[in-house]
Structures are given as structure tokens and as C-alpha cells.
Image (spheres, grey):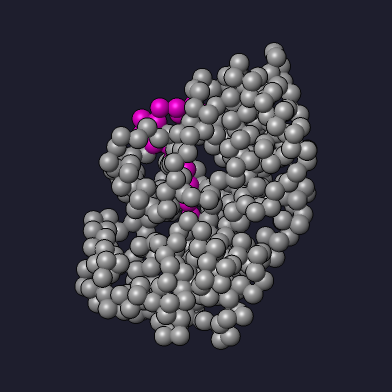
Amino acid sequence: MIRFSFLQPGAVAGLIVLGLMAAACVRGPVNGGGGAPTAAARVASSGFLCPEPSPGIDVSSSELNLFVWTEYIPQDIVECFEMVYGIKVNRDEFSSNEEMYAKLAAGGAAYDLAQPSDYIIGAMIRNGMAQKLDMSKLPNFANIDPAYFPVPGDESGDYVVPYQAGTQAIVYDSAAVPVPPRSWNDLWNPDFAGRMVFVDDMRSVIGIALLAEGRDPNTTAPADLEAIKPRLAELVRAVKLFDSDSPKTALIAGDADIGYVWNAEAELAFREKGAIRYVFPEEGSFLFQDGYVLLMNAPHADAAYAWLNYSLQGDTFWLMLRDFPYTMPNRAALDYAKEHQPDLYNAYINSPITNTPPEAWAAGHTISDVGEALVFYDRLWTEVKGG
């Protein structure tokens, strides 16, 4: 990943120490007064100059507990938030919505914010895992593009702060795959067996088999799932690697030539390896939206609101274009990047991988909450993956 270096390493280390020492003496946003560190002292370990909180939020908590996707938050934002607010960020990570949901349902973890995707959000709300947001504490929510709100699964818009959006589609190395795939059915080509990397995403991988058979990817009919079982099993056997942490790694290294990944993984692979291509299948790709939910009984709700507002600032959230280039729902971040990071902005705007074409988005499929039918998906996935 690209890192900016504004200061020499020794100077950065010294400044960080000064910033942390001063931050330990204050609570709430640091704004340069009363012995607090100056803005120049708040520099991330990469050399990134931390933006001021705008607006600052009064906080009494000393820590914040996040439960988030792997490789999904720029480290600069974490470090800057810690220095600006004097709050320790504790972060646990998950690789699938199912993993996240199971851990939260089991209890025993005092998280403040979680980062679910659309189809699992409805289940979290229905089962009392999330609390309604106090929008008066989220002034920077105004930076969200209305096109990405509300997040699917939270139709009322009361529970979820949009984070990122994107697509899941076919990626391939054009140097190794001379005939571009065009359909989900192409993934069953025997030539691709043992050459594919997939994200380990139960609902959408089952959805591929359903779409390939002309069925609803959100079916609640057990008969539909039973009918696709043989084809799904064939597809799963052909996958060399299931990797939801960093599927781009196999593509860049040449360990896989084709696969099914999130769009930012394809974009980052393309930046490293120019032969990488991304295809929206003719049956339609899968769309996703992720967001933050404030968990029921969050022990540090004040810190959670401070984190959300700081993350939503345009001068912080633009870092997603650099580190995790999905489809950007934050208008202020795009405006900031257009003015201050034109190369990143233009790369995003001109890439159909990140800036999804309207026709591809319109033809896409959102994975929806299937309620009690989820048990049938779980059973099918367990049987196929285990076989």
C-alpha cells in the first residue's frame, strides 16, 4: 500500500511520543489549548498529519472497542483518532458476516461498534443486537451521499452509518486467461479448476450457483437450494483457495489466475499487476454495502460517536481511496481528494472497478436477509465445504 512520508522517521517517533504524553493528560478532542499537543505534534507513524476533529466531540471514555472486517480501516485513521482524542482503540477482526454474527450472538465481548454487511444487518436489528443511533450526535453524517442511505437491511435508516459499498464479480489475469469470462457459468470451465481464488462468502457463493441456474439468489425455498447442490459442490471443488482476508495476494503472486473477489481487492491487485481485469457477469454482479452499528449496551458509546464523526470527515475518509478502494459513499471525501489528492481521485473516477458504472450497479443483485431460511443456507454450505 502507498504510504506518505512527510517527516524523517526519527522526527516522527519523537513527535508521536510527545503527542501521546500530552494526550494522556486530556479527555475529549485535543485542540491545542491548555497544554495539549499542537496540531503539528499529531502525526501518524507513517508521517500522515492528523486532521483536527471537525467538530470535536466531548468524550469521557478512555477506550473504544471495534469489531470490524480485516484490512478495512486505514491505520492512519486509527492512530490519529487515538492521538486526537486520547482514546485507545481496541480492534478485533472477522472474515465473514457469519463469523461476526456468531460471536456477537454468543455474548461475552464488550464491543462498541461492529461493521456488518447488508444481509446480516436485518438479523442484528431483529434480534436486538443494535441500538438506534442518536443522529444529533452525528453531524458529519451529512457527508454521506443519499444514494447510499439507508443501507439495505436498515430500511428505516435508524441503525446504520454507511461505511463502504462495492461489487463482487469475476477477476482474472488476462496474461493467463486469454478468453475473458462473461458469465457466472464460465467459472465451471474445467480449465479453471485448481486455478481460482474466492472470497469465503457463503451467501454470495451460493448465490453464484443460484444465478447460474436462473434462480433467485435470495430464495427462501429449500427445494431451490437442494437443486443446486451438485453444481455448487462442483464449483467449490474447483476453487484452489478461499480467502476473505487478502484474495488479491494469490492473484498478484500468480497462485491463482481467476476468481471471485470484492472490487477493492481487484483494484489493488490491478495496481500491482496490470494484467488483472474485472468483469461484471452478464447475469449481474453482487452488490454490497457495509456500515457501522452501535451495539446494544456498548460500554463506550461516547467514544463510538466520536469515532464515527472523525471517520466521516472528508479529510480522513479519503484515505479509503488510497488503502481500500471500494465504492465511495462519502461525498466530502471525494471532494477532498479531488482538490488535494487528484491522482487518487482520478484513478478512482476513471476505474470501472471502483467507480461502478451505473448500468452495472443497476443490473446487480443485493444479498438480502432471508430470515429463518438462513438455516438451509448454513446446512448447504457446511455439507458442500465439508465434502
Quarter holding residue 39: top right
Front-most of residues 20 and 14: 14
The boundaries of the magenta stretch are: 289-303
Residue found 58% across the figure and 57% down from its top? 326
Say left or right for 362 vs 123. right
Residue 333's place in the image compared with 35, above or below, is below
Q: Residue furthest front?
A: 10
Front-most of residues 247 and 123: 247
Residue found 60% across the figure and 42% down from its top? 75
Q: Quadrant of the C terminus?
A: bottom left
Does the magenta-highlighted stretch encompass residue 334?
no
Front-most of residues 376 and 369: 376
Residue 277 seen anywhere in this rendered image of the structure: yes
Say left or right for 127 vs 317. left
| Label total for image | 0
Task: Indicate the position of residue 99 as horizontal and vertical percent values.
Answer: 35, 50
Quarter holding residue 110: top left
Residue found 57% across the figure and 60% down from its top? 264
Front-most of residues 70 and 118: 70
Residue 384's place in the image compared with 50, above or below, is below
Task: Indicate the position of residue 118 as horizontal and vertical percent values.
Answer: 42, 54
Residue 361 seen anywhere in this rendered image of the structure: no
Task: Indicate the position of residue 40 as horizontal and vertical percent values.
Answer: 76, 29
Task: Indicate the position of residue 280 as horizontal and vertical percent values.
Answer: 53, 73
Residue found 42% across the figure and 80% down from its top? 193
Q: Quadrant of the N terminus?
A: bottom right
